[in-house]
Amino acid sequence: MKVLVTGGAGFLGQRLARQLLTRGQLSDSRGRTHSIDQIVLVDVVPAHDFGDARVRVVTGDIADRALLRQTIDTDTTSIFHLAAIVSGQAEADFDLGMRINLDASRLLLDICRELGHRPKVVFTSSVAVYGGTLPDVVQDSTALNPQSSYGTQKAIGELLLNDYSRRGFVDGRVLRLPTISVRPGKPNKAASSFASGIIREPLHGESSVCPVAPELRLWLLSPRRAIESLIAAHELPAQSLGDSRTVNLPGVSVSVGQMVAALEKVAGPEVASRISFAPDAAVERIVKSWPGAWDVTRARALGLAADADFETIIRAFIEDESEDALTAGKA
Ligand SMILES: NC(=O)c1ccc[n+]([C@@H]2O[C@H](COP(=O)([O-])OP(=O)(O)OC[C@H]3O[C@@H](n4cnc5c(N)ncnc54)[C@H](O)[C@@H]3O)[C@@H](O)[C@H]2O)c1
């Protein structure tokens, strides 16, 4: 079988590819297990191929029909559609966000429909589909009311995945990911970039300026759990999802102040003292519109799990960074 990962050079795309290569197999929409013969990583920037002959790197724009058509055929049994223009950038560039987050997603689904082979499609949505006046605890059934263009594009993508699944064109699974923290590397253009920066930079001996107040609550998931959830959701039988393909993933609900306290506990007061606060109205407006507490009974019943707490997330980040450094040293 072939697996397509859009956004395959991205943060989650690369981690997912690595995990799929190790795992070596996936089930198709009829529940039959197949070994993975090829993983196609498509992205506007060249993806790392891990030196593995099963990886095919395609560099280009998923809004380009010809390019996308080259990456999907009837052997493409599984698609992880991760390519996106992230929240801050989609807000700054409306046309780009619409073209990639919405138009390209529909194009991908239409190519699957034309081919008629009903692949599994896992789509990464976001807590940004919620907003406005929200209950204290958000349910799967809480009405969507995005307060950003990114959230709106993700909400439309969710509905499309549900309808294309209902019509039998694809076998879709939509995961509303919490904010992923702690993310390695450089800050990105997501409004939530600070949710990693305030932990990562102090651990690297650098100062970090937090653009939101300590009271603000976030809904967080580690990269490890995010990848586990993407694969677990792929493997679920379609009938277990009932009449909605969309699932709110479990996360850890934590205030920024509690994140700083957890950092102090794990790495000491000197590290935690590298964080300062300077509110940024634009970031606060976007992030405040995202809910901080959730009822994830349905996801848990499907076997999807969160990290134990934020301290566990920090410790996992430290472990993953040292593993990444070792792998880079060996390469
Ligand atoms: N990381 C998070 O906190 C988080 C939270 C909620 C949802 N998500 C979603 O998860 C997915 C992956 O997120 P990530 O953190 O890995 O983001 P990322 O920015 O690291 O990866 C996205 C990738 O998409 C690629 N891309 C952008 N435009 C493209 C185009 N036209 N054609 C091909 N590739 C293109 C980018 O180059 C990038 O490598 C995204 O859909 C994102 O919206 C992420």
Image (cartoon, rainbow, N blue to C red):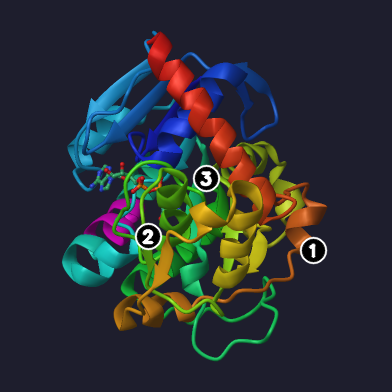
* Amino acid of disc 1: Thr
Residue 245 seen from this side: no
Q: Does residue 286 appear to the left or right of 218 in the view shown?
A: left
Q: Give the main secondary structure of the magenta stretch.
A: helix
Please tell me whether mark 1 sits on a helix, a strand or a loop: helix
For residue 215, above or below residue 310: below
Closer-to-camera residue (143/196): 196
* Amino acid of disc 3: Val
Closer-to-camera residue (51/318): 318
| Residues at circles 3 and 1 in contact by the CB criterion of under 8 Å | no
Q: Which residue is drawn at 73% across and 49% down?
A: 305
Can you identify the residue that label 3 sits on? 122
Mark 3 to mark 2: distance in Å?
34 Å
Q: Residue 236's spot in the image, x, y percent?
A: 70, 41
Can you identify the residue that label 2 sits on? 208
* Amino acid of disc 2: Ser
Can you identify the residue that label 1 sits on? 297
For residue 315, above or below residue 326: below
Q: Residue furthest front?
A: 270
Q: Residue at x 43, y 59 (%)?
A: 274
Using the rendered view, name the quadrant where residue 38 is placed: top left
Closer-to-camera residue (314/160): 314
For residue 22, above or below residue 307: above
Please tell me whether mark 3 sits on a helix, a strand or a loop: strand
Give the residues in magenta: 99-106
Q: Residue at x 46, y 25 (%)?
A: 324
* Foreground tag (3 vs 1): 1
- Quadrant of the snapshot with the C terminus: top left
Badge 3: few (under 14), some or many (20 or more) residues near its Cα, within 10 Å?
many
Badge 1: few (under 14), some or many (20 or more) residues near its Cα, within 10 Å?
some
Q: Does residue 144 appear to the left or right of 296 in the view shown?
A: left
Residue 259 seen from this side: yes
